Image (spheres, helix red, strand yellow):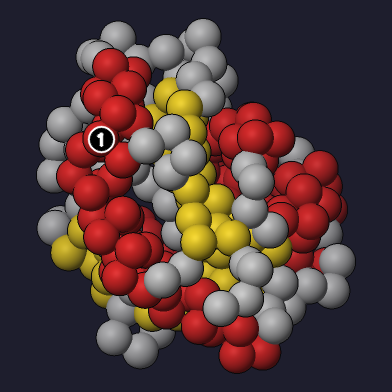
Amino acid sequence: MSQDKYSILLPTYNECENLPIIIWLIVQTMEKSGFDYEVIVIDDGSPDGTQDAAKQLQKIYGADKIVLKPREKKLGLGTAYIHGMKHASGNFIIIMDADLSHHPKFIPKFIEKQKSEDFDVVSGTRYMGDGGVYGWDFKRKLVSRGANFLSQLLLRPGASDLTGSFRLYKKPVLEKLVSACVSKGYVFQMEMIVRARQLGFSVGEVPITFVDRVYGESKLGGSEIFQFVKALLYLFATT
């Protein structure tokens, strides 16, 4: 066994129903695969009791495995990663959603892919191999495909899925990328991959299936789409 350790960052906001399930799945997967890991829960002051759920989970699985680093209020994804990274003891960082749209069973595949060619970044892709999306209506799929097509066309990123948020990074690489990024929200994920290419980092991809939220509201609306296109054009102009 190598000395690699994987810090899994879970930014949460109102995920008290999903958190016990996702953490159980992560623990099962990681224990079975034998990789050293920790889960860092970064809750942005959820009013629904997510933090209480996290404390219970910490009692069950131990404070060495479940690390709680809450924040006072909703501060967004980019800063959640920076906050989580500061507290991460692993030399690799895995970023995923806490809402069960990303299944932890793909994590060992990410790790194997990373080891196979010493990739700096490994990204989950819904648009390659047996990857795909479940539970989205036609409109949502169309928007997602359209966004991805536009991004490919304008940015030529060398990766097939730019807006996904299920990824593995070498910790120093993630630190460099985060400090190079200017976007917020959804576009942040896309910019990370574009900057990775710009800075000469290698990106591997693993096909994943993405499942739409089981509980709670999806956070994608018309204004997000507008913001996305605006940010995409900004990136196109500046990279």
Q: Badge 1, how many Cα within 10 Å: few under 14, some, many 20+?
A: few
Give how far across and how far down residue 3 sits, in percent. 65, 68
Name the foreground residue: 51 vs 215: 51
Disc 1, SS: helix
In the rendered image, the vertical position of residue 156 relative to residue 238, given as above or below? below
Q: Amino acid at mark 1?
A: Ile
- Residue 33 appears in the picture as rendered: yes
Give how far across and how far down residue 34 sits, in percent. 41, 71
- The residue drawn where x is 33% and y is 63% is 31
- Residue 217 appears in the picture as rendered: no
Name the foreground residue: 158 vs 103: 103
- The residue drawn where x is 31% and y is 40% is 61
Name the quadrant of the C terminus. Answer: bottom right
- The residue drawn where x is 51% and y is 75% is 111
In the rendered image, the vertical position of residue 235 relative to residue 149, given as above or below? above
Q: Is residue 191 left or right of residue 218?
A: right
Give how far across and how far down residue 151 sits, in percent. 58, 65
Q: In this figure, which residue is indicated by the disc labeled 1?
A: 60
